[in-house]
Image (cartoon, rainbow, N blue to C red):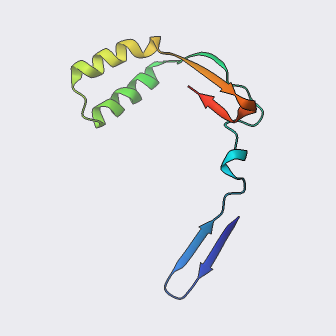
Amino acid sequence: KVEEVTTPATTTTTSTPSAAPEERQATASVDFTGNWTLLVDDSFKSEYDSYLRKLGQPMLVRTVAMTVIGSTKEEAIQSEGGKQLFI
Protein backbone atom coordinates (compact mmCIF):
# COMPACT_ATOMS: atom_id res chain seq x y z
CA LYS A 1 0.00 0.00 0.00
CA VAL A 2 1.43 3.40 -0.98
CA GLU A 3 0.09 6.71 0.32
CA GLU A 4 1.12 10.08 -1.06
CA VAL A 5 0.47 13.33 0.80
CA THR A 6 1.11 16.63 -0.97
CA THR A 7 1.38 20.07 0.62
CA PRO A 8 2.47 23.26 -1.12
CA ALA A 9 6.12 22.77 -0.03
CA THR A 10 6.56 18.99 0.18
CA THR A 11 5.41 15.63 -1.08
CA THR A 12 5.59 12.68 1.31
CA THR A 13 5.24 9.10 0.15
CA THR A 14 4.63 6.37 2.71
CA SER A 15 4.86 2.70 1.81
CA THR A 16 3.42 -0.10 3.92
CA PRO A 17 4.57 -3.68 3.20
CA SER A 18 1.73 -5.85 1.97
CA ALA A 19 2.95 -8.93 3.85
CA ALA A 20 4.46 -9.36 7.27
CA PRO A 21 8.16 -10.38 7.19
CA GLU A 22 7.33 -13.92 8.29
CA GLU A 23 5.00 -14.26 5.26
CA ARG A 24 7.57 -13.22 2.63
CA GLN A 25 9.23 -15.79 0.43
CA ALA A 26 12.62 -15.81 -1.26
CA THR A 27 10.87 -17.16 -4.34
CA ALA A 28 7.23 -18.00 -4.78
CA SER A 29 7.15 -20.82 -7.29
CA VAL A 30 10.67 -21.50 -8.56
CA ASP A 31 13.14 -23.72 -6.72
CA PHE A 32 16.73 -22.49 -7.21
CA THR A 33 18.29 -25.35 -5.23
CA GLY A 34 21.34 -26.75 -6.99
CA ASN A 35 24.91 -26.10 -8.09
CA TRP A 36 25.44 -23.12 -10.36
CA THR A 37 28.32 -22.16 -12.63
CA LEU A 38 28.84 -18.57 -13.72
CA LEU A 39 28.78 -18.13 -17.51
CA VAL A 40 31.72 -15.92 -18.45
CA ASP A 41 32.19 -14.37 -21.90
CA ASP A 42 34.41 -11.54 -23.16
CA SER A 43 31.73 -8.92 -22.49
CA PHE A 44 31.36 -10.07 -18.87
CA LYS A 45 35.13 -10.05 -18.38
CA SER A 46 35.36 -6.51 -19.74
CA GLU A 47 32.59 -5.26 -17.42
CA TYR A 48 34.06 -7.14 -14.44
CA ASP A 49 37.51 -5.67 -15.05
CA SER A 50 35.98 -2.19 -15.29
CA TYR A 51 34.12 -2.79 -12.00
CA LEU A 52 37.31 -3.93 -10.22
CA ARG A 53 39.21 -0.96 -11.65
CA LYS A 54 36.55 1.44 -10.29
CA LEU A 55 36.97 -0.22 -6.89
CA GLY A 56 40.66 0.70 -7.08
CA GLN A 57 41.98 -2.85 -7.38
CA PRO A 58 45.57 -3.08 -8.68
CA MET A 59 46.40 -4.87 -11.96
CA LEU A 60 47.69 -8.00 -10.15
CA VAL A 61 44.40 -8.48 -8.27
CA ARG A 62 42.35 -7.86 -11.44
CA THR A 63 44.45 -10.35 -13.42
CA VAL A 64 44.04 -13.07 -10.79
CA ALA A 65 40.30 -12.36 -10.51
CA MET A 66 39.88 -12.56 -14.29
CA THR A 67 41.71 -15.91 -14.30
CA VAL A 68 39.57 -17.57 -11.61
CA ILE A 69 36.16 -16.00 -12.30
CA GLY A 70 35.35 -18.63 -14.94
CA SER A 71 35.76 -21.45 -12.44
CA THR A 72 33.42 -19.90 -9.87
CA LYS A 73 30.72 -22.27 -8.66
CA GLU A 74 27.93 -21.61 -6.19
CA GLU A 75 25.49 -23.82 -4.37
CA ALA A 76 21.98 -22.54 -3.69
CA ILE A 77 19.71 -24.15 -1.11
CA GLN A 78 16.08 -23.11 -0.97
CA SER A 79 14.01 -24.31 1.97
CA GLU A 80 10.81 -23.84 3.91
CA GLY A 81 8.69 -23.53 0.77
CA GLY A 82 10.70 -20.61 -0.59
CA LYS A 83 10.93 -18.64 2.67
CA GLN A 84 14.71 -19.12 2.88
CA LEU A 85 17.33 -18.99 0.14
CA PHE A 86 20.99 -19.64 1.01
CA ILE A 87 23.71 -19.03 -1.58
Q: What residue is drawn where x is 34% and y is 27%?
A: 49
Image coordinates for residue 51, horizontal then vertical, percent: 35, 33
Q: What residue is drawn where x is 78% and y is 33%?
A: 29
Comparing 51 with 33, the one in front is 33
User: In the image, is 49 to the left or to the right of 40?
Assistant: left
User: In the image, is 57 to the left or to the right of 51?
Assistant: left
Say above or below: 86 vs 40.
Answer: below
Image coordinates for residue 33, horizontal then vertical, percent: 67, 21
Residue at the farthest right position: 29
Image coordinates for residue 40, horizontal then vertical, percent: 49, 18
Residue at the farthest bottom position: 8
User: In the image, is 15 to the left or to the right of 47?
Assistant: right
Comparing 24 with 38, the one in front is 24
Comparing 46 with 76, the one in front is 76
Comparing 35 with 52, the one in front is 35
Q: What residue is drawn where x is 25% and y is 29%?
A: 57
The mark total stands at 0
Image quarter hosting the N terminus: bottom right
